Image (cartoon, coloured by chain):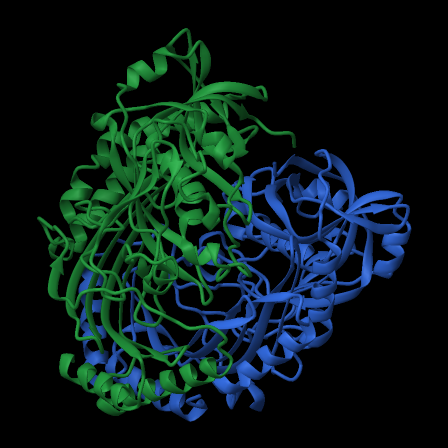
Chain colours: A blue, B green
Amino acid sequence: MKGEDFYRGLFRIINEHLMGMKFLSVVSNRDHSLTRFANSQIHQNVSEKETKITVLATEDNKIALVSSNDLTLSGMKLLREKLESMLKQAAPLEYEFSLPVPSMGYPLENVSESVLKSSAEDRAKVFDDILRSAGDDVKVFGYVSTEVYEKSVISSGGMFTYEATSSAGFNLVAIKDDGSGYTSGASSSVENLGYSEKVLRAVEFAKKSVNPVEIDPGNYTVILGPEAVAELFFYFTYVATNGYAHEMKMSPSNRYLNQKIGPDNLSVYDDPEHPGQIPWFYDIVGKKRERFPVVENGVFKNIVYSHGSSLRFSKKATGHTVSLENLDFAIPVNLVINGGETPVEEMISSTEKGVYVNRFHYMNIVDPFEALLTGMTRDGTFLIEKGKLTRAIKNMRFNVKFFDFTKNIEAISNETETVSGSYFPIVAPYMKANNFTFSSKTA
Amino acid sequence: MQQKVRKVLEYLDSKGVRYADARHEEHILQEIVAENGVLKSITLETSVGTGIRVLYENGWGFAATDEKGNEALMRAAQKALETAIASNRRSKSKVELAEEPVHKANFNSPVIKDPFTVPEGEKVDLLRKVTSEMTRTESVKRAMGTMRFRKIEKLFLSTEGSEINQSITVSGAGISATAIGESGFQVRSYPSSFGGDYSTKGWEFIQNMNLLDKAPEIASEADALVKAEEITPGEYDVVISGNQLALQVHESCGHPTELDRVFGSELSFAGGSFLTLDKVGTLKYGSDVVNIVADATVEGGLGSFGYDDEGVEAQKSFLVKNGVFVGYLMDRQTASTIGVRSNGASRADSWSHVPIIRMTNINLLPGNYSFDELISGIDYGFLLDTNKSWSIDDLRLNFQFATEIAYEIKAGKLTGKIFKNPVYYDITPSFWNKCDGISNEKHWRVWGVPNCGKGQPMQVMHVGHGTAPARFRGLKVGVKK
């Protein structure tokens, strides 16, 4: 970790080297380590360190972007030369571009000692714990990771923001014969990863899911675990919350924004301050991020606008710009799906016939306009009969329109968990929904 | 740098490692994006660094740094060593590496015109013209054009004595038109979707795409699609075009033949494989006409190189021969486990990542049919073109693909009628056994897929797929929603 002073020093150097230019610069430093295991043995153990500078420069309503990991003085000189040359050859944007209004936000740090000082041996000890919990007859596959990330946004207009965060993460597939279970988690510190209980549950699922039976595709009542719920809602945010797509009339939000899409207790937030999240305090253009309602009391309340889209469509930027390369793209990155009132045990016991899904695999968007999503079940799919998980079932493919799914939500659990997510951690509950379409099975 | 890296390896040798290698890489990426006749972004990214991999007894360690000084490299080497020692303490099995000759070599990808010598203004102008042309169609509200160029300079050294320099250039481009109508929007892309097509050739690859000539046709098809019907779900005979088959080969042959997946190394993320060791030489993966090779030697293929990232020479090997599954993609460790030489599929997407088993160019070999002969053999069916969506299960069996467009075939001829949102699905061996004809060499080409994700930390790899249009009998098309 380089610390705030390093970035304050860089602020001066960058300003000196880019004097006379209008620019916004993001300097990030990532120190990431990951231990991967399969068949109950470590097979990959890696660490990487990189400090990177990205500069967006503008002149005569044109923009150019240069990024490099050469922070030497000669590197800075080269960076300026490239920007100047690119701006000469660039063409003006179709909307009036301006850099973000400078903000001098507080430096924000959320770095735990356990991640900062973590070594390969420390990660291996977490692996040892997981192995012990699994027992001799269950094989484990997964990873344990740690990361310290610093980001500073600097602009010619005087902006300076600094943030530093730590994160620890893990995932695990437990295998017993032809049965499997899965879990994952993320936290700002190793000690709060909370893997022990989750690992035991994945192991229990693996043991319970041996000898799966085949059931026919069709519409079922489902109870989705937090891993499955998180994936569905991630795809919802990806396909339906970007303000750019909304303004271009290419989003399901054109029909569903401000509509009641689910039960009163369905609320979804982008919340960097939630204790279960790894906070992203400032977005990539230095805008301070606040708790932001996406769905509230069942109503699809807000979509998110990036810096580019806010200028292009005269909207207020919402702190969701995640890329300087694509200034039109915005997405919530600290997704929190609120819990409801029903304990998961009650959801199961109240189900006469249904399917429990622990996790979805390889989801994708079939039709973005309809928010039609597909994917497979994986690592713990069970038949629910007369209020009990009775038998493991073979994996099935689903094809579901997201807004049909939310309309059919019957219950949301009071329990929530942080799962590692495909791209970033998500806090999610269990959900019970009716008429969930499984369209095919694995032969 | 060669000397600095050599010193690092000498240090690791002195510490008793069984094996170590180091890759010093410089990457330059240029990306230009235009939208509706206007430049959207122009980006230049450079990244330089060194990755050091160590095998200590039976434990692996890897550390990467973007610092270039001797001390920084030594720190990274020390970290890789400590990490390998931590791995080794938990190791229960012997790690062996398949034999590979020591190579001292250079490789350059076949570039006629270096794309980085072409003025940015020329590239910007072309994309502006192409996207502007597409917006002349009234319903096209979003016309996008993208070009990407990459240059990778790679130095590889190992404690076995290999010293390899490679210079690889990548060029790619693609355009798309989004038409908006009453019932939603539809996208049509050229030459392929999700960013276009890519190659390890130079600017000539872009020139040969004829983007400006193709733009009106793409826009017109997008416009027609928003007014088109959907296919009534059922079983149909279909011809699948080359750019869609590229992704089909990728997902249902490339990934399941990765031997690390078979051994469980990817199980917690991307999944395993149905192609277990007992199926080699016995599983009828496809019909007799299906032949699939891994070939890193194809000139200009996006998955082509001289040597992989553990110094194994580029090769061509069969994965499926006359319909029978016969081989895997391997690195030196997994190859050793089954007692063969590595076929050179160990690759990393940057200096900061450890090499893992990746596809090279996974090619469906051409057959004997002309394209017209394939079509003429269908009473009623469809030609499916350009990928729109994909999903496959964790063992690579149950898949579902959507394409941008379906062209109707009636009485052996394309009728000119099109359908929107076509979706097809099947189980991998069942699908490939339905194949009864593949177009000949005239229609065969290598498609570049620049975004293959695998591994943790995630690595995004450039791979290629040689395909020609092929015919499949009785495929399920359409899906219950």
* Residue B252 in the figure: left or right of residue A122: left
Q: Position of residue A238 (x, y in %)?
A: 55, 52
Instruction: Please report the residue visible at 25 percent of the width from the left and 31 percent of the height from the top.
Output: B444
User: Could you tell me residue B5's position as x and y percent?
Assistant: 20, 81
Spot occupied by residue B77 in the image (x, y as percentages of width and height)? 31, 85
The one nearer the camera, B283 or B73, is: B283
- A207 up-or-down from B316: above or below: below
Q: Which quarter of the rendering shows the C terminus of chain A? A: top right
Q: Residue at x 51, y 83 (%)?
A: A164
Residue B147's place in the image compared with A69, above or below, is above
Residue B383, quarter of picture:
top left
Q: Is residue B393 above or below residue A44?
A: above
Q: Is residue B254 above or below residue A345?
A: above
Front residue of A356/A180: it is A180
Q: Is residue B327 visible?
A: yes
Q: Quadrant of the N terminus of chain A?
A: bottom left
